[in-house]
């Protein structure tokens, strides 16, 4: 008896959804794009304009950004005119001492990276963004920066890309 009641309720809900034009849509990647409107994106080069320059960072960051967009949206990356555009520059790349010990030496060092991003929505004017995003990682001061720099840049780039995605394409 209970299964017949459950079947009737389920059938009724399905009929209502079909007649009402409702649809259930889940987006687990956070992208909030109408793919009927937005089909293309152009990601410009993101040059390093910081006082301290680590040349591989530009390629690491750009690759991470392009990969994240392609994995989490259905947008086609194009050169030239597009529905959406991301451009910017790496404006901060610096080290600061952290956790100073009793003998006035730092036991930890912080690597901070900042990226200024200009996001242009060519379909809707009020959605443009011009914002700086920063992220950092601490490492043991006994380690040489050269030994941990690649890994730290990769981790920081991943975090920055998620922040940028959420503020632009994710529409959070």
Image (tube, rainbow, N blue to C red):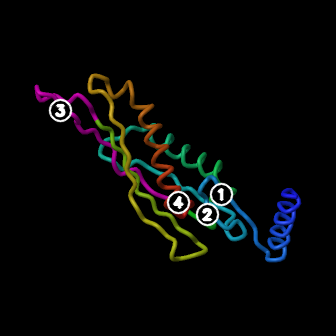
Contact, mark 2 vs mark 4 (Cβ under 8 Å): no
Residue 77: name its quadrant. Answer: bottom right
Q: Which residue is mark 1?
A: 27
Contact, mark 4 vs mark 1 (Cβ under 8 Å): no
| Residue 86: image tag | 4
Q: Which residue is mark 3?
A: 100
Mark 3 vs mark 1: in front: 1
The quadrant of the rendering that contains the N terminus is bottom right
Q: CA distance from mark 1 to mark 2?
A: 8 Å
Instruction: Please tell me how crowded label 1 is: few (under 14), some (14-19), or many (20+) other residues with Cα within 10 Å.
Output: few
Residue at x 67%, y 68% (from the top left corner): 34
Residue 36: name its quadrant. Answer: bottom right
* Residue 2 in the image, given as x and y percentages of width and height: 84, 57
* Residue 143 in the image, given as x and y percentages of width and height: 31, 23
Residue at x 46%, y 45% (from the top left corner): 159
Instruction: Please tell me how crowded label 2 is: few (under 14), some (14-19), or many (20+) other residues with Cα within 10 Å.
Output: some
Q: CA distance from mark 3 to mark 2?
A: 44 Å
């Amino acid at each position: 008896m209970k299964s017949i009641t459950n079947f009737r309720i389920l059938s009724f809900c399905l009929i209502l959804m079909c007649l009402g034009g409702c649809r259930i849509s889940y987006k687990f990647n956070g992208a909030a794009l109408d793919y009927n409107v937005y089909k293309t994106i152009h990601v410009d080069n993101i040059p390093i304009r910081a006082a301290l320059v680590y040349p591989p960072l530009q390629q690491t960051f750009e690759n991470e950004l392009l990969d994240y967009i392609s994995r989490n949206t259905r947008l086609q990356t194009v050169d030239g005119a597009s529905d959406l555009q991301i451009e910017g520059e790496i404006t901060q790349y610096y080290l600061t001492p952290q956790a100073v010990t009793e003998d006035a030496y730092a036991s930890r060092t912080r690597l901070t990276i900042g990226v200024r991003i200009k996001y242009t929505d060519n379909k809707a004017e009020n959605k443009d963004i011009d914002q700086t995003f920063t992220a950092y990682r601490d490492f043991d001061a006994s380690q040489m920066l050269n030994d941990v720099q690649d890994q730290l840049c990769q981790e920081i780039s991943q975090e920055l890309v998620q922040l940028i995605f959420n503020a632009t394409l994710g529409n959070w």
